[in-house]
Amino acid sequence: MTILKNKRSHRVPGSVYLAAVIILAAAISFVAVTQLNKDRTVTYSLYPYLPEAEYYTEVLEEEWSKLHPDVTLEFVPYDCYSDGRPEGIDVVMYDVFLEKEFVEKGYLKSLDVHDLIDTEDFYGFTLEPADGYADNYGVPVFLCCDLMIYDRNDIELNKAENIFDVAGSDSDLLISFAMYGYDIYLLDAAADKTQDPVATQYKDRLKDIDVSANRNALANAAVPEYRDADSGDLAGLYDSGAAGGYIGYAETMRSIRTRIDGTEVKQISMDEQDNVPLYYCDMAGISADVPEDQTGLCMDLIRIMTDREVMKRGSVKDGRPQYLMSPRISFYDDMSREYPMYAKLKDIVANESNRLFRAYGSFMDDTYRR
């Protein structure tokens, strides 16, 4: 009888074979996805009047390349006020002023903001959907509001609570009427008068105020020789000593060099009633035409746009603060450690009465497109 020796089997165990198959399949899948991504592009726009937009674009694209090195990110110029449907743009940045119009015209996908951002680090008023809607259609990226930016040693401006106080004082205030004339300030006055932050038809809102009295107050408060100056020049004029203060956005303070340490900021009413603090907001949304297999990439881009560190990087250029206003709470604490003005801006944006400035009805056609 032949006795067979017990030899160790040379067959590969089934579990090892299965693991090898899985690894090989994953590798093939990775190569396929990588090749597919090389042919993919995500397009985006920015708010057309974002200061230092080219620098912010560089920051976004650098962060994007870390997350999706094989997907091209392409900037597409788009003016949300005049260009209509954002065709060919995946992630569109627009003024919240226009959001309801964009939703009604089918420009945007609805979003779950809780999937995109840590909502507890965002001021609550920036996340409120438009009236009549349960869903959000955009995520807040930047805030903007009219501020009185002034010298703390100017006693009259320190005391002023509204434009009538300024008009009746001996202090000088720079106000530009070059772009919209008196219209935008009168609309603000109507909101203050009625305590209603929603813009409807412009002519209807003017019925709520004494137009002549409000126009005269604005005219008397403004330094006459600079009423037609470009609004972007007011900060420089203030810095040169042309006046005790000016009306402008926070980001204009990047032009203040010599007076920044002695500068204060606050919001004032454009009527004699209490101020209704209104904010413009640059929102990032996903175009309704974006296919589902592209949506995930778009959401990643919005996450980058709203990222805490990206906001900080985008707000300091060449070692100088840009004084951009963020909807993020932690942003102000981070920035104020090095730039004290941000502590003052936090006091303003933390006001529980703050509201987003939205337009309903045909307001844009009645006002800016007439």
Image (cartoon, grey):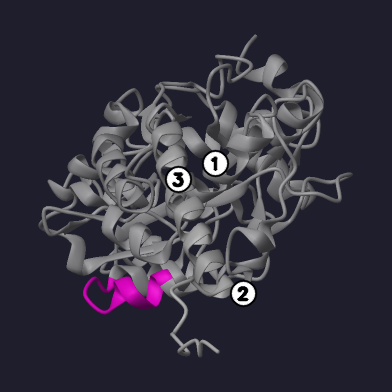
Q: Are marks 2 and 3 in contact (CB under 8 Å)?
A: no
The amino acid type, in three-letter code, at marker 2 is Glu
In the rendered image, the residue lying farthest to the top is: 370
Q: Are marks 1 and 3 in contact (CB under 8 Å)?
A: no
For badge 3, the amino acid type reads Ile
Amino acid under disc 1: Cys
Which part of the image, by quadrant, shows the C terminus? top right
Lower position in the chain sequence, tag 1 or tag 3: 3
Measured as percent of width and height from the top left, residue 17 is found at 52, 66
Give the vertical position of 282 relative to 355 (above or below).
above
Residue 144's x, y, as percent? 48, 48
Give the vertical position of 52 relative to 21 (above or below): above
302 or 26: nearer the viewer: 26
* Front residue of 343 and 48: 48
- 129 in magenta: no
Q: Which residue is mark 2?
A: 120
The residue under label 1 is 298
Q: What's the residue at 44%, 85% (across, down)?
A: 7
Q: Earlier in the sequence, mark 1 or mark 2?
A: 2
The disc label shown at residue 28, or none: 3
Magenta stretch bounds: 331-340
Q: Nearer the viewer, mark 2 or mark 3?
A: 3
Q: Residue at x 53, y 39 (%)?
A: 217
Q: Quadrant of residue 190?
A: top right
**Would residue 338 be visible to someone looking at this image?**
yes
Q: Secondary structure at mark 3?
A: helix
Residue 333 covered by magenta stretch = yes
Instruction: Kindly report the distance in space between the C-alpha atoms of the residues bearing marks 1 and 2.
Output: 22 Å
- Neighbour class for label 2 at 10 Å: few (<14), some, many (≥20)? few
SS class, disc 1 = helix
